[in-house]
Amino acid sequence: MRRLTLPAMLLPALGNVGIAYIAPLIVAKLVGRIADDDGIGLRATLPYVLAFTVVLLLAEALWRIGLHCLNRLDALGIEHLYVIGLDELFAKDASFFHDNFAGSLTKRVLSFASRFEEFVDTLTFNIMGSLIPLLFGSVVLWRYEPLLVVGLLTMITVTALCVAPLIRRRQALVDQREAAIARVSGHVADSLMNMDTVRAFAAEESEAAEHRSRVAASRRLTLLSWDYGNLRIDTLVAPLSVATNALGLLLAVTLSRGGHGVEAVVVAFTYYTNATRIMFEFNQIYRRLESSMTEAAQFTELLHSPPTVLDPASPDPLPTRAASLRFERITFAHGPGAPLFEDLDLAVPGGAKIGLVGRSGGGKTTLTRLLLRMTDLDAGRILIGGQDISRLRQADLRGLIAYVPQDPAMFHRTLRDNIAFARPDATDAEIRRAAEAAHVTEFADALPEGFETMVGERGIKLSGGQRQRVALARAILRDAPILLLDEATSALDSESELLVQEALWRLMEERTALVVAHRLSTVAGMDRLVVLDRGRIVEQGTHEELLASEGAYAKLWRHQSGGFLTDSPTDDGALDDGAARADVN
């Protein structure tokens, strides 16, 4: 890309020199010749005409070659920035995405790349394309009369000094405008991603009203920045531009009386007119540059805060015994508040099947996210196969784990692609076997396009149970030594759950499994159950042992309603005695 930069920047500027300065210079010499010799014939004018033609053709050739290089520079630059932008977002930790709108991030990362074209084109056509011809014109004018150059550069300098502070003040308005546009984008994406919820609550009008409010705010700030450029900056530049042209004409006429002739008048007036175009374009050039730079800056500002979850500089190799887990005196807090976990210890032998149960907010899902290293601990460490996970590359660590979250994420891709996401190099036969094991084929084979069916954004075309089956098929295809299930069957009906549970038990054979569940019947057969309450392990043991101990688990079991736990604790930490009881198989 670097080898394209010089010709892309210089050749159009040299073309401008030919078109705007050399060609008028030839015409001026011809006019001067005619003025000096009334009887000049066609033969005498022909060399001027030929020279004029050749200069214009060469200038056009330089433009074509320059644009050829510039097109490739733009395309390669945009491609490079698109890749960098997404790579930088991939490097961010989970908390970053919790704090930013997906729509706003999308706009910023796309603008970061797409505005490169506008920035480079402005630099090429308006800055280099004006400064290099201005330099050439100054040399030519100096040969006629140094005062012409002094007058021109003085007026350009005065204009720049007057405009610069106004442009800096306008930057604050531009920043506010771009922030308002980002808020509009974020709200639009948020509303579209949650369209079913909007419709379910008949909130179309309120969302539309919020959108109108944000768009109106964006319009007001946009007009403020535009009006400032038009009424404050351009109204200053316009009279200075006129004064510069008048000065050029006055100097040219004065010089013609001093013996320089008509040629000097034509050259001086033409060059001054071309040069003052730069003065009038100060604001337009800066507007385009500031717009592209501001949008790029909005994205780069996000990169100023480095990710908190980092790979070690010298990562350890993968553990040879990757099945055992140990949470060793871990402490973790969500934000600046009190810690959720404090000196928590939990050991999971290799091949063990552990169920995590307890009321909502007890820390079950957080424990799984810490194991995946979506965020780092405040203190303590987590070991896999006796090895600290913070010493492993994040990709290597997560390669050891098959994860099924309670809200499975689907991509707007085919059903096959969504399953193969766990292992992109899997064969069609392997994907089919995983789908059969998770009972995906029961609905996939009935679809018109089968496994090539597009599932819609976030899997909107699939039911909750179907999405969970696809997520289970991913885990089966992953074939990792550690299985992490977070309410993996919560959206399944009883019949489907029974079938999927059988598949899960087969999947858990010879694997270490950590299973989060509110529906206690789904984990009653685990090797050990761990009861979490407000980040503490209040008891652990087998299902039978915990029932016999008449502790927190027994109360949760008795007070379970419809297979789900209520969240209303009594004074002793159990659930509300008024809750309906249900028989659980």
Image (cartoon, grey):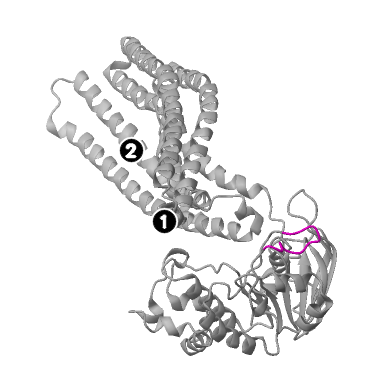
In the rendered structure, find residue 72 and report the number of the disc placed on it. Answer: 1
- Neighbor class of circle 2 (other Cα within 10 Å; few <14, some 14-19, many 20+) is many
Residue 570 inside the magenta-drawn segment:
yes
The location of residue 408, given as percent across then percent down, is 55, 69
Kind of element beneath mark 2: helix
- Tell me which residue sits at (20%, 19%) in the image: 35
Q: The C terminus appears in which quarter of the rendering?
A: bottom right
The amino acid pointed to by label 1 is Arg
Mark 1 or 2, nearer chain start:
2
The location of residue 465, given as percent across then percent down, is 50, 74
In the rendered structure, find residue 404 and report the number of the disc placed on it. Answer: none
In this picture, is 476 found above or below 111?
below
- Neighbor class of circle 1 (other Cα within 10 Å; few <14, some 14-19, many 20+) is some
- Tell me which residue sits at (18%, 32%) in the image: 45
346 or 233: which is nearer to us?
Answer: 346
Residue 405 is drawn in which quadrant?
A: bottom right
Q: Give the range drawn in magenta.
A: 569-578
Residue 54 inside the magenta-drawn segment:
no
26 or 494: which is nearer to us?
Answer: 494
- Tell me which residue sits at (73%, 54%) in the image: 334
500 or 21: which is nearer to us?
Answer: 500
Q: Can residue 509 be seen?
A: yes
The residue that disc 2 covers is 18
In this picture, is 441 found above or below 406?
below
Check the image and name the residue furthest to the front: 578
Kind of element beneath mark 1: helix
- Tell me which residue sits at (64%, 67%) in the image: 580
The location of residue 540, given as percent across then percent down, is 81, 75
